[in-house]
Image (cartoon, grey):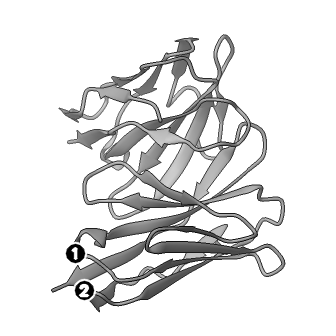
């Protein structure tokens, strides 16, 4: 498994502002992902964070709204831009070591409430 | 139609009961299959991978039927600590994209 930390663990933000969430892994991993879990819902993949290149976004998610960085093999950030109450959700990062379709491990999540 | 469909439950069972969850997936290109467990206000954690030959881990047995695109999870001798949401998950495509079912809620009661 992998030890994954996320910062902040929770935040309350005003609409129109932006929040950057950090994900740190205790060892180098090939793949890092960002998911959203809206209240009462299951997880939805936002994007794959690619090291050294632009993130790959899923349908319905765009870079202007959710810019992602991945400067190295142990760290990634997700920014939620120009927030609205509809962005209130749990944001989770996950990692997969090998890139060969093996198990993904999840960080503890960041709980975001937008007022 | 959702890519991964599960009965949302809740399944309310007494301790010691056997309970089975089912899941169907729509993408025949799916490559890997998992059951994750998510406790309230926690992140999902891998329970077990699912293989065509079936696999067992203690009280938990998972089965995969590729022809029917169907996955199951059987829990025997349920414990109070088994109460959680069980997520059926399939992966496919570049970079092991995971697609989650909506989850099945299990409540084990004494």
Q: Residue furthest front?
A: B58
Residue A26 showing in the rendered view = yes
- Going 67% across and 45% down the picture, which residue do you hit? B97
Task: Judge whether B70 appears above or below A60 on screen.
Answer: below
| Quadrant of the rendering where the C terminus of chain A is positioned | top left
Q: Locate residue B2 relative to residue A77 in the image: left or right.
A: right
Residue A79: % across, % down: 42, 25
Give residue B65's quadrant in the image: bottom right
SS at mark 1? helix
**Between residues A41 and A16, which one lies in front from this camera angle?**
A41
Q: Are marks 1 and 2 in contact (CB under 8 Å)?
A: yes
Give residue A6's quadrant in the image: top left
How packed is label 1: few (under 14 Cα within 10 Å), some, or many (20 or more)?
A: some
Q: Locate residue B17 relative to residue B92 in the image: left or right.
A: left
- Going 55% across and 17% down the picture, which residue do you hit? A28
- Going 35% across and 83% down the picture, which residue do you hit? B77
Q: Locate residue B66 relative to residue B72 in the image: left or right.
A: right
Q: Which residue is mark 1?
A: B80
Q: Which mark is residue B15?
A: 2
* Chain letter of the residue beneath label 2 in the structure image: B
Query: Distance of mark 1 from mark 2, alpha carbons?
Result: 6 Å
Q: Residue furthest left?
A: B110
Q: Which mark is residue A95?
A: none
Residue A73: % across, % down: 57, 14
- Going 38% across and 54% down the picture, which residue do you hit? A38
């Amino acid at each position: 498994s992998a030890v994954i930390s996320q910062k902040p663990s929770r935040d309350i933000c005003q609409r129109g502002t932006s929040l950057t969430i950090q994900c740190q892994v205790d060892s180098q991993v090939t793949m890092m992902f960002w998911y959203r879990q809206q209240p009462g819902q299951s997880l939805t993949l936002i994007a794959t964070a690619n090291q050294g290149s632009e993130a790959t976004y899923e349908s319905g998610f765009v870079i202007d709204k959710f810019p992602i960085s991945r400067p190295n093999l142990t760290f990634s950030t997700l920014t939620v831009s120009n927030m609205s109450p509809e962005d209130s959700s749990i944001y989770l990062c996950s990692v997969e070591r090998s890139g060969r379709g093996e198990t993904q491990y999840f960080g503890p999540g960041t709980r975001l409430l937008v007022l | 139609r959702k890519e991964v469909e599960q009965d949302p439950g809740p399944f309310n069972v007494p301790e010691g009961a056997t309970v089975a969850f089912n899941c169907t997936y729509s993408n025949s290109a799916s490559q890997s299959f998992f059951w994750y467990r998510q406790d309230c206000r926690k992140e999902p954690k891998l329970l077990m991978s699912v293989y065509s030959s079936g696999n067992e881990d203690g009280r938990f047995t998972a089965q995969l039927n590729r022809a029917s695109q169907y996955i199951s999870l059987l829990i025997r001798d349920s414990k109070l600590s088994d109460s959680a949401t069980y997520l059926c998950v399939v992966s496919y495509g570049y970079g092991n994209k995971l697609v989650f079912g909506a989850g099945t809620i299990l409540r084990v009661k004494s």
